[in-house]
Image: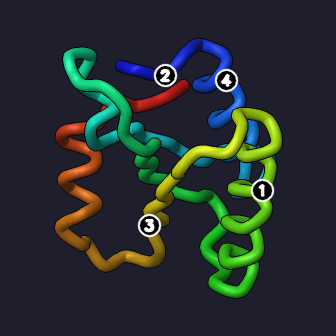
């Protein structure tokens, strides 16, 4: 996995802060592969809070906090909302790494 311990910590702490303590986060995409270089940070998040209007603002605050702490880089966030099982959710969980 191509994230430092500091980056992992900041991602998880901010996810808990903005989406709720019981939020789960996975890193997926090219950053999972140690052999690759570059690439954006792709995050799949299962938020504790499922209120749609609150989630929109939480996502913006989450990204703003990460950019302030990790520097300007491309960060993509996929939020699981509701009970519908989209293919991207399964791909992210099956190919990704859970962050703690």
- 47 or 1, which is in the foreground? 1
* 10 Å crowding of disc 2: few (<14), some (14-19), many (20+): few
The answer to whether the residues at label 2 and label 3 have Cβ atoms under 8 Å apart is no
CA distance separating discs 1 and 4: 16 Å
Q: Is residue 80 left or right of residue 30?
A: right
Residue name at image x 44 percent, y 62 percent: 78
Figure quadrant of residue 64 = bottom right
Disc 4: which residue: 9
For marks 1 and 2 on the same chain, the one whose residue lies earlier in the sequence: 2
Identify the secondary structure beneath mark 2: loop
Q: Quick one: quadrant of the N terminus? A: top left
The answer to whether the residues at label 4 and label 3 have Cβ atoms under 8 Å apart is no
* 10 Å crowding of disc 3: few (<14), some (14-19), many (20+): some
CA distance separating discs 2 and 3: 22 Å
Residue name at image x 28 percent, y 60 percent: 89
Disc 2: which residue: 3
The answer to whether the residues at label 1 and label 3 have Cβ atoms under 8 Å apart is no
Identify the secondary structure beneath mark 3: loop
Disc 1: which residue: 64
Looking at the image, residue 100 lies above or below residue 58: above
Identify the secondary structure beneath mark 4: helix
Disc 3: which residue: 80
Q: Quick one: quadrant of the C terminus? A: top right
For marks 4 and 2 on the same chain, the one whose residue lies earlier in the sequence: 2
Q: In the image, which is nearer the foreground, mark 1 or mark 3? A: 1
For marks 1 and 4 on the same chain, the one whose residue lies earlier in the sequence: 4
CA distance separating discs 1 and 2: 18 Å
């Amino acid at each position: 996995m191509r994230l430092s311990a500091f980056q992992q910590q900041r991602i998880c702490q901010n996810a808990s802060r903005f989406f709720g303590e019981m939020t789960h986060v996975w890193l997926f995409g090219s950053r999972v592969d140690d052999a690759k270089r570059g690439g954006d940070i792709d995050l799949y998040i299962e938020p504790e809070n499922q209120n749609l209007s609150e989630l929109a603002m939480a996502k913006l605050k989450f990204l703003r906090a990460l950019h302030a702490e990790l520097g300007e880089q491309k960060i993509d966030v996929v939020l699981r909302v509701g009970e519908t099982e989209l293919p991207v959710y399964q791909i992210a969980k099956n190919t990704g790494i859970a962050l703690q």
